[in-house]
Image (tube, grey):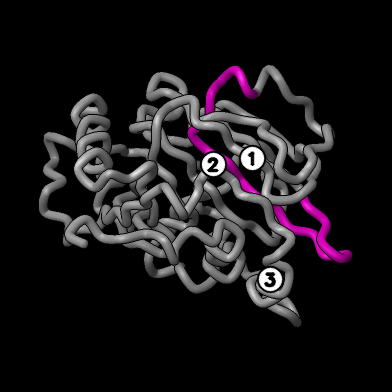
Amino acid sequence: MAGMTDVCSMTTDHALDAWLMRHQRQFFPVVPFDPATDALLAMDFTESNTTLSGDILNDTALFSRYVEEALAKAGARYGYGGYNEHRTVYGRSPHFSDPAGGEPRRLHLGMDIWGPAGTPVMAPLGGMVHSMAYNNNPSDYGATIILSHQLDGRQFYTLYGHLSLDNLQELKEGQYIVGGQAFAHFGAPHENGDWPPHLHFQLIEDIGLHEGDYPGVCRYSERASWLANCPDPDIILQLGRYARPANT
């Protein structure tokens, strides 16, 4: 995930989230999910989740087992959540710290879908491959793809992090992806930034000069600017209504 030296100050006459809400019926699923048969577990990675110890967070195998066991116990196909969530989990890596000792990055700007490596990822609507990269810093995105979309004359971007490295070899920048087309897969820890397998899905209105990367975590004090440029991904995913806490 890119550094945070270029805080967004983008404003628009018509907010992207409201615009996307008017087009919700046009979006395809991003992962295979049937609400009639599949369960979705709401997952919490804030300090209120006291089951996540430092020993678990700092050992990817233990962290992966934690996620797998949580899903199995809930009978859920995926774990879900994280947008606008202030996460202690990012203390696992210096990638989210300020080298000068200032405020670390902890506020999550995307939505996470936790599930098995190899889970297919589909485009929610047609778009071009804007850029790709292997962001291989500790706890970074790993394999990353960004799509550019035009919807009734308005441009925005979707970012997909923690993918399989093979997907970067299979696509070309400028390639058109059809809505509903499977173009990527959840990556394994060795290729996804050393995380339990999951997808980081993020909406971006103004991507600036970024290519193959865009901040997915910001400083809490700067949240207003970043959230304005990165609205709630559930507007497209439309999965939040199905997510249930572990105790329900």
Q: Nearer the viewer, residue 53 or 206?
A: 53
Q: Which residues are magenta?
A: 149-167
Q: Are marks 2 and 1 in contact (CB under 8 Å)?
A: yes
- In this rendering, which labeled residue sits more in front, label 2 or label 3? 2
In the picture as drawn, the residue positioned furthest to the right comes out as 153
Q: Earlier in the sequence, mark 3 or mark 1?
A: 3
Main SS of the magenta part reads strand
The amino acid at mark 3 is: Leu
Q: Which residue is mark 2?
A: 32
Judge depth for marks 3 and 1 and give the one in front.
1
Rendering coords of residue 42 (x, y %): 32, 56
Residue 196 placement, left or right of 161 = left
Image quarter of residue 238: bottom right
Which residue carries the number 1 mark? 122
Sequence-earlier tag: 2 or 3: 3
Residue 23's label in the rendered image is none
Quadrant in the picture for the C terminus: bottom left
Q: Are marks 3 and 1 in contact (CB under 8 Å)?
A: no
SS at badge 3: helix
Q: Residue furthest front?
A: 36
Residue under label 3:
16
Tell me the CA gap for discs 2 and 1.
Answer: 8 Å
- Could you tell me if residue 177 is visible in this image? yes
Residue appearing at x 48%, y 40% in the figure: 199
Relative height, residue 228 to residue 201 (above, below): below
Residue type at numbered disc 2: Pro
Q: Position of residue 163 (x, y in %)?
A: 53, 30
The kind of residue tagged 1 is Met
> Is 133 one of the magenta-colored residues?
no
